[in-house]
């Protein structure tokens, strides 16, 4: 039985990965301050993520390792390089463009699967699945909102990956070029109004180029002025080498907590694709939601790890959307605390006001 290791196995994502893989693989998970006792389903091992020898000892036990220990921007490269030295496939729920750049010199020595979380990860899988549905895909448009209290590492990763080129703010993809698009979008989701702005991610641009799309937009919900100001302060502090940014991040989390209060937390993503299928112009809509974004991240990371074990992957850098079997995932998702709904609307040729609905 293959052994899958989960660094940060007591965290928000790691603790949710273990039940998904339980019974199918031998599991080993790390903790640092949240002590866990080993049991039949999983062996626990204390690991200090800053200690290279402890990470090495952990990875030596694994056939594949998933890194959920803290902010990937701060420790992902170190863990990935140790995994490469041991030829152990490395899975990262984060680690989009910034980690890809950092691993260029070792990418041919190991299997690295990045963007294996909710966003990026599931977002890319849905975009790719949508485009692949059409004979001729034309446009893709996605939006995402998370009304939940993020963890310290989630905020740190958001700040640091944006600094390193996670995407391009207030821009969209238009026929091969990146264009400025400052248009805002207002949506009512679960009875609450949200304001969205264009933020072209590396993932969305990658899908657009893969399918030669005419247009690609990705919209993120605005955090609000108070949180944005604190995030900007944290960025300045980090760039100046000051550790005060960590306390600013804690202030950001406190602000999120005050804003949400007693509201039900949730994460929601919608993908809308247009294209031609059997001489009809069709709009396909995919909606995915969960009470917690970490639930979705855990699903993608777990499935990416299994794909790395079962698929004959060449050494190099891969994204979860390239290796996870979306058809199988769609079958399993109802059992995984995640809701997925996919529908299509057939648009009459040349007339967009007459349509007939059908569920896919």
Image (spheres, grey):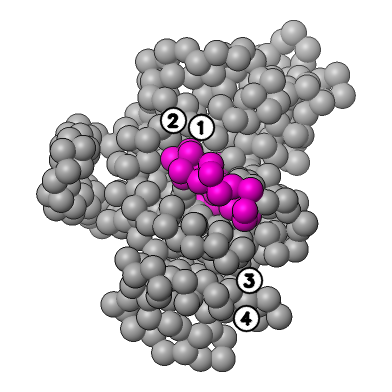
Task: State the residue position of label 4.
Answer: 26
Is there CB contact under 8 Å for labels 1 and 3? no
Against 215, residue 261 (above or below) is below
Against 54, residue 122 (above or below) is above
Residue 326, horizontal then vertical, whole percent? 71, 50
Identify which residue, 211 or 343, lies in the foreground.
211
Task: State the residue position of label 2.
Answer: 167
> Would residue 95 be seen by someone viewing this image from the given angle?
yes
Identify which residue, 181 or 349, lies in the foreground.
181
Please identify the quadrant where the C terminus is shown.
Answer: top right
Is there CB contact under 8 Å for labels 2 and 1? yes
Mark nearer the N terminus (1 vs 4): 4
Residue 107, horizontal then vertical, whole percent? 59, 47
Kindly report the distance in space between the C-alpha atoms of the residues bearing marks 2 and 3. 32 Å
Q: Farthest residue toward the top? A: 350
On residue 355, the disc is none
Mark nearer the N terminus (2 vs 4): 4
Q: Quadrant of residue 52?
A: bottom left
Q: Please state which of the two labelled residues, at mark 4 or mark 3, is closer to the viewer.
A: 3
Q: Farthest residue toward the right? A: 278
Q: Please state which of the two labelled residues, at mark 1 or mark 3, is closer to the viewer.
A: 3
Crowding at mark 2 (Cα within 10 Å: few <14, some 14-19, many 20+): many
In the structure shown, which secondary structural element does the residue marked by tag 1 occupy?
helix
**Residues shaded magenta:** 96-123
Kindly report the distance in space between the C-alpha atoms of the residues bearing marks 1 and 4. 34 Å
Task: State the residue position of label 1.
Answer: 202
Residue 116 drawn in magenta: yes
Crowding at mark 1 (Cα within 10 Å: few <14, some 14-19, many 20+): some
Kindly report the distance in space between the C-alpha atoms of the residues bearing marks 4 and 3. 10 Å
Q: Please state which of the two labelled residues, at mark 2 or mark 3, is closer to the viewer.
A: 3
């Amino acid at each position: 039985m293959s052994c899958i290791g989960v660094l940060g196995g007591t965290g928000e994502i790691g603790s949710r990965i273990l039940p998904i893989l339980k019974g199918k693989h031998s599991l080993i998970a790390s903790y640092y301050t949240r002590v866990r006792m080993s049991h039949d389903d999983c062996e626990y091992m204390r690991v200090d993520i800053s200690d290279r020898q402890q990470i090495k000892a952990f990875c030596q036990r694994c056939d594949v390792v998933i890194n959920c220990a803290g902010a990937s921007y701060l420790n992902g490269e170190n863990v990935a390089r140790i995994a490469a030295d041991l030829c152990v496939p490395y899975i990262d729920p984060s680690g989009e463009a910034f980690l890809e750049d950092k691993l260029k010199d070792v990418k041919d020595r190991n299997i690295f699967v990045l963007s294996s979380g909710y966003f990026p990860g599931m977002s890319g899988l849905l975009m790719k699945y949508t485009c692949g549905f059409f004979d001729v895909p034309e446009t893709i448009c996605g939006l995402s909102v998370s009304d939940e209290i993020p963890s310290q590492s989630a905020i740190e990763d958001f700040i640091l990956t944006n600094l390193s080129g996670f995407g391009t703010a207030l821009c969209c993809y238009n026929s091969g070029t990146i264009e400025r698009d400052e248009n805002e979008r207002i949506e009512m989701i679960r009875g609450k109004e949200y304001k969205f702005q264009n933020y072209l991610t590396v993932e969305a641009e990658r899908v657009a180029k893969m399918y030669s799309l005419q247009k690609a937009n990705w919209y993120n919900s605005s955090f609000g002025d108070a949180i944005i100001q604190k995030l900007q302060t944290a960025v300045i502090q980090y760039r100046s080498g000051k550790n005060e940014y960590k306390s600013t991040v804690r202030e950001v989390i406190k602000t999120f907590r005050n804003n949400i209060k007693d509201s039900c937390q949730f994460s929601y993503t919608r993908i809308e694709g247009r294209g031609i299928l059997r001489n009809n112009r069709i709009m396909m809509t995919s909606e995915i939601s969960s009470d917690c974004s970490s639930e979705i991240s855990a699903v993608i990371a777990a499935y990416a790890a299994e794909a790395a074990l079962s698929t004959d992957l060449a050494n190099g850098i891969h994204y979860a959307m390239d290796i996870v079997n979306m058809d199988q995932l769609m079958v399993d998702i109802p059992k995984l605390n995640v809701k997925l709904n996919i529908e299509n609307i057939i648009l009459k040729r040349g007339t967009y006001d007459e349509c007939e609905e059908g569920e896919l």
